[in-house]
Amino acid sequence: MTPEHSLTPKSSCADYTIEQAWETYTNEEHDIWRQLYERQMALLPGRAVDEFLHGVEVLGMSPDQIPDFRDLNKRLAGLTGWQVVAVPDLVPDDVFFEHLANKRFPAGRFIRRRSQLDYLEEPDIFHDVFGHVPLLADPVFSAYMEAYGKGGLRALGRNVLNKLARLYWYTVEFGLIETDAGLRIYGAGILSSKSESVFCLEDVSPNRIRFDLQRLLQTHYRIDDFQEVYFVIDSFQQLFEETYQDFGPIYDRLEGLPEHKPFDIVEGDNVITRGTGAYAAARLKESA
């Protein structure tokens, strides 16, 4: 343990949960939360979906300190029956699905270092709690998350988890939604990122395509940079209805079908914005 960062304990529980040990967070860690929180809340009004901003409010999140899961869960359970459980790091697929299927969201308890404010490969408490948890206060979106967990449990053993991961990635992590006021963000990977909060809505580079479940499941994604495509839903109700089904027939149809690269535009796409690809091309040139 360094003087600036508290130690993340390892779990001995079958479900990988640990105590949050809120009292052990350092002043430095609370200050990093404050800096991240204030930075995002200055950006997100007018960019984030209203349900997210409402969730931040009703769950009592603030820049003052890292949320204490005991207090957070009292509010969240009263709204949708969900709770947040602390885990030391990423958990196995079966454990993750089991948590979601039982209305438990696993969140890392550690927070990034100040040198990692703009990018962190492994999700920390700011990404998990600030980015994900506010929308769990919404009944429809939280029902989608529960359904995703149950669908994941059914998918185990079918060798299709890569496709199910794409659904999570392009909705829960990097999803956009069409509202009467225009496109808004609901994906946690964007909501917790200063730069992508702007890029996803305002940059000319990425494609923005209306949500199509089968098309999405065929599409690879970027894990190391801004997304080259964003899938746009019409509503959380649409997302829930289109994914609350037996995916077995869909998986069967996908066998032998081509996989799509992130920036592909394919026949049948309902394109909202055809991107220039300029950002991705420039990054490729830089790495050459």
Image (cartoon, rainbow, N blue to C red):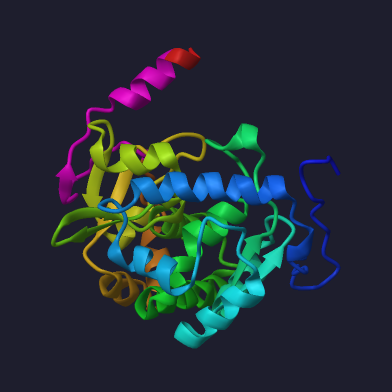
Q: How many marks?
A: 0
Residue 190 visible in the current orientation: no
Tell which residue pokes out farthest to the left in this image.
Answer: 180
In the rendered image, the vertical position of residue 126 relative to residue 87, given as above or below: above
Question: Of 159 and 34, which appears nearest the observer?
Answer: 34
In the rendered image, the vertical position of residue 121 relative to residue 76, given as above or below: above
- Please name the residue shown 31% across and 47% down the image: 230
In the rendered image, the vertical position of residue 148 relative to residue 278, given as above or below: below
- Please name the residue shown 29% across and 38% down the image: 264
Q: Is residue 269 left or right of residue 15?
A: left
Q: Residue 117 at x, y = what percent?
A: 56, 37
Res 157 quadrant in image: bottom right
Question: Of 209 and 249, which appears nearest the observer?
Answer: 209
Q: Residue 46 at x, y = what percent?
A: 25, 52
Q: Is residue 86 left or right of residue 19?
A: left
| Quadrant, the N terminus | top right
Q: Is residue 121 left or right of residue 53?
A: right
Question: Of 271 and 201, which appears nearest the observer?
Answer: 201
Q: Residue 71 at x, y = what percent?
A: 61, 76
- Please name the residue shown 48% across and 72% down the image: 59
Res 229 quadrant in image: top left
The residue stretch that appears in magenta? 261-285
Residue 223 visible in the current orientation: yes
* 274 within the magenta span: yes
* 278 within the magenta span: yes
